[in-house]
Amino acid sequence: MDNAPSSEYLPLKSDGDWSHAFSYHPFDVEIERAEGVFIHDTKGNRYFDASGGPFAVNLGHGHPKINAAIKSQLERFAYAHPTLANRPRADLCKSIASVTPEGLNTSYLVSGGSEAVETAIKIARQYHVACGRTGKYKIASCYESYHGMTLATMSLSGNPGTLRHYEPMVSHWPRFHQYSDYKRPEGVSRDDWAVLTARELERIISYEGPETVAAVIATPHGSGPEYGVVPPARYWQEIRRICDENDVLLIADEVVTGFGRTGKWFGMQHFDVVPDIMTFAKGINSSYLPLGAVTVSDKIDAPFKDGAYFVHGFTSGGNPVAAASGVAAIEAIKSDGLVEQVAERGRQLFSHSERLNRHPSVADVRGWGLFMVLELVQGSSDRSYFPSDAGAEQRFQQIALSNGLALYSTLYGARRRPVLSRGLPMWIAPAYIITPGQLDEMVDRLDRTLHQWEQAMGVG
Ligand SMILES: Cc1ncc(COP(=O)(O)O)c(C=O)c1O
């Protein structure tokens, strides 16, 4: 059934059955079932899962191979006593090593992206301690980045709007600016700008003292207002050089980009740069069960193989059912040629860029693979967004839902101010299995949504 354009979609009232869920505020659309690229609600409406939740459901809903692996593992054992060998855990680590860049061969399994980033921080710090560099403890990250919601990962994520509620944060973390096409001065090439931007990291390391900096963490693409900006390869190559010269480890946070989303297995492969540590979640098993991983290079692994004891562990880390779902997801991506398929469908998605960019509310269309970001603005030339009391996100989401599209970041934008006062990055990230016909239909619905939203908000 198609959605009636006049439907009113309102945020759920936090009463009755929902009153016991702390801080829970979705729209009043109750999911009944989901299959492939679609979510169905209890009223018979169907929605494109147009962003895979938050870039999470990469293989679509109800994937038969992942479902079968989960069922089969459940029937054998659902939990593994930590002192006894857990075969699915070994299988998943082996499976990850079969696709990660050369030299990154060992993984630590956790339950999600925030845990993966926390784990990566601890590995980086303990690696230096094990090598006798005990003063190296700082982790540098980008302003406006996002690496998770625990206190330590929030300390890395440079968003004053969200940090304010929890300060003082865990530690002193140095920050540097990310690559920005928007801020690139006229007459400076992307490559030159990339090198200039990257060199800010060099300056920060020298100010902090290289003997105090353990690692740098960043996503392969831009974050915050620069969400989805793909920097030139020179940017990452320069960051790699600076890290090498200062004995600083490079952690690539591939929680979003890992396992095919960008049209390559990993985002960093677009730049020919190999990190020391990579963090994963989401696409590792299409988020069917809580799962994440940290994969390290042989260099980082060496002192631990030689006996350094990693003081870490979560009760659910390496859960056999979650691990089995990861093995099945990676196997499906390989056997169904889905990385190549993402590259192809990505070209189809971006063939619509011009059409979407023609909207006065769309300041930029960017991204890679099946990872498109529209920067939504008020329509003015300075890329400013609507004031928080204009209800722009809520209106957008309501109109999108009435057009049969479930999107994600529109709900989050208002809460992220003031950093996102520039423009709201809206993600388009359908499942890898979307057909060419479905993809065109999804973009048509998006086009219509933008048009109706502009009318409702008086843009254009
Ligand atoms: C780049 C990045 N790192 C870490 C995280 C945290 O992952 P999780 O929500 O699974 O804890 C996210 C979540 O969106 C992310 O985008």
Image (tube, rainbow, N blue to C red):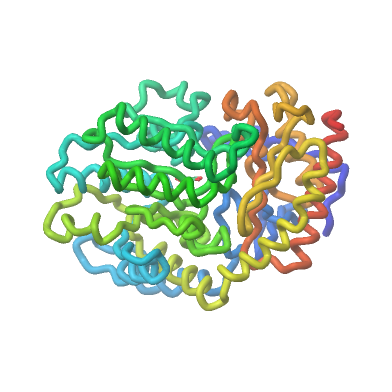
Quadrant of the snapshot with the C terminus: top right
> Which residue is depicted at the point 78% across and 67% down?
437
The part of the image, by quadrant, that contains residue 25 is: top right
Residue in the foreground of this view, choosing between 226 and 338 = 226
Residue in the foreground of this view, choosing between 380 and 316 = 380
> Which residue is depicted at the point 30% across and 31% down?
206
- State whether residue 419 is above or below residue 114: above
Residue in the foreground of this view, choosing between 109 and 29 = 109
The location of residue 288, given as percent across then percent down, is 51, 60
Q: Is residue 14 visible?
A: no
Q: In this view, does 200 lie to the left or right of 124?
A: right
> Which residue is depicted at the point 34% across and 58% down?
295
- The total number of labels drawn is 0
The location of residue 1, given as percent across then percent down, is 83, 59
> Which residue is depicted at the point 29% across and 63% down?
106
Q: Is residue 259 left or right of residue 138?
A: right
The location of residue 386, given as percent across then percent down, is 72, 26
Q: Is residue 334 visible?
A: yes
Q: Is residue 109 left or right of residue 449?
A: left
The location of residue 336, given as percent across then percent down, is 57, 76
Q: Which residue lies furthest to the bottom in this view?
A: 335
- State whether residue 306 is above or below residue 123: below
